[in-house]
Image (spheres, grey):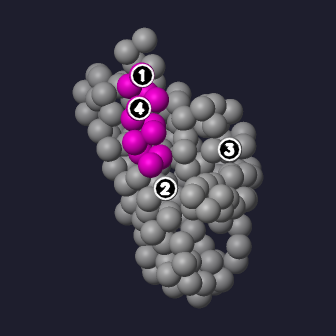
């Protein structure tokens, strides 16, 4: 888990190596307006990406059923070309989701991308039971989608 400060009930995580420079992968990751072009899970993300500001996401949780959800969170970390983080706005005792995305330059043309979200609070077991697998699948899709987008741009 990347940088969580709370004991999690469960977490979802995905990791992938991307054949593109970290600066390019970062540029794709923070170009929120273009998410609908490449991100099959978080198809709409709006934020200034300033710590303390709101982040609004629309997620395709179960695409076959047309089940989408809207989530409003708070940006908690922006470490340029390295890490992004945000968390849910609900009371921590009720449900806290804390997400981190991290880039690690393996060399000038390869980047490791890791995304992780830890869930805690009294509703976390219900989230895990009802939609935990959907989040896991979604994060794996984000990793693959980011890889495809960045590698396509790198080869252009």
Q: Of label 3 and label 4, which has the lower sequence position?
A: 3
Q: Position of residue 135 (x, y in %)?
A: 50, 63
Please report the residue visible at 29 percent of the width from the left and 39 percent of the height from the top: 17
Residue extending farthest bottom: 122
Q: Of label 2 and label 3, which has the lower sequence position?
A: 3
Give the secondary structure at mark 1: helix
152 vs 61, left or right, is left
Closer-to-camera residue (82/140): 140
Label ID, residue 44: 3
Label ID, residue 152: 1
Residue 56 sits above or below residue 111 on the image: below
Contact flag, marks 4 and 1 (Cβ < 8 Å): yes
Give the secondary structure at mark 4: helix
Q: Of label 1 and label 3, which has the lower sequence position?
A: 3
Circle 2 residue: 138
Between the C-alphas of marks 4 and 1, the distance is 6 Å
Label ID, residue 148: 4
Please report the residue visible at 68 percent of the width from the left and 33 percent of the height from the top: 33
Q: Where is residue 126, by image quadrant? A: bottom right
Residue 129 sits above or below residue 75 on the image: below
């Amino acid at each position: 888990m990347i940088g969580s400060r709370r004991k999690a009930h469960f977490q979802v995580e995905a990791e992938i190596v991307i054949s593109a420079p970290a600066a390019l992968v970062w540029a794709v990751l923070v170009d929120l307006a273009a998410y609908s072009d490449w991100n099959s899970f978080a198809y709409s993300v709006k934020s200034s990406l300033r710590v303390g500001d709101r982040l609004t996401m629309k997620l395709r949780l179960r695409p076959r059923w047309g089940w989408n959800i809207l989530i409003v969170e708070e940006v908690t970390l922006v470490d340029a070309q390295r890490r992004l983080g945000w968390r849910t706005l609900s009371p921590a005792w009720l449900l806290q989701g804390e997400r981190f995305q991290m880039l690690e330059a393996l060399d000038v043309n390869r980047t490791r991308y890791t995304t992780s979200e830890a869930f805690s609070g009294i509703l976390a077991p219900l989230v895990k039971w009802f939609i935990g697998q959907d989040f896991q699948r979604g994060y794996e899709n984000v990793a693959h989608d980011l890889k495809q987008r960045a590698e396509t741009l790198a080869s252009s």
